[in-house]
Amino acid sequence: MNRIYLDHAATTPIHPQVKDTMRKVMEESFGNPSSIHHYGRESRKRLDEARVTMAKSINANYESIIFTSGGTEANNLAILD
């Protein structure tokens, strides 16, 4: 039987290319992006590249892309800002 997943509001399967990129980044760029050492600068570079990619994908300004740690933080940001 073929199954179809229809609950993408709860979670979404990760595209293989995204999974490969995430694995590479987690193995190579594990520094705190706010740190000034090599690993931190490398993480900041990757974070900024991701922000640019996301902004372009929705025709937004780079500065308007904000990453949060999860839904609660995002909700608070939307409500309190």
Image: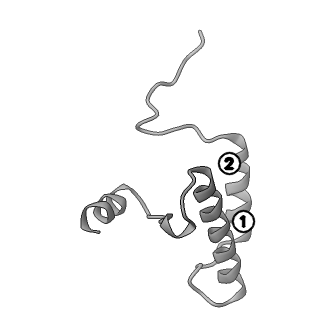
Residue labelled with disc 2:
18
Q: Is residue 14 left or right of residue 63?
A: right
- Disc 2 packing (10 Å; few <14; some 14–19; many ≥20): few
Determine which residue is flagged by label 1. Answer: 27
The quadrant of the picture occupied by the C terminus is: bottom left
Q: Locate residue 38: give its quadrant.
A: bottom right
Secondary structure of the residue carrying tag 1 is: helix
Q: CA distance from mark 2 to mark 1?
A: 14 Å
Tell me the quarter of the image containing the N terminus.
top right
Amino acid type, residue under disc 2 in the picture: Val
Rendered location of residue 15, percent (x, y): 66, 40
**Which of pointers 2 and 1 indicates the residue nearer the eye?**
2
Residue 13 - label:
none
Q: Position of residue 78 (x, y in %)?
A: 31, 61
Q: Residue at x 65, y 58 (%)?
A: 53
Query: For numbered disc 2, what is the local secondary structure?
Result: helix
Q: Position of residue 9 (x, y in %)?
A: 41, 36
Query: Height in image: 35 above or below 28?
Result: below
In the picture provided, is 69 more to the left or to the right than 27?
left
Q: How many marks?
A: 2
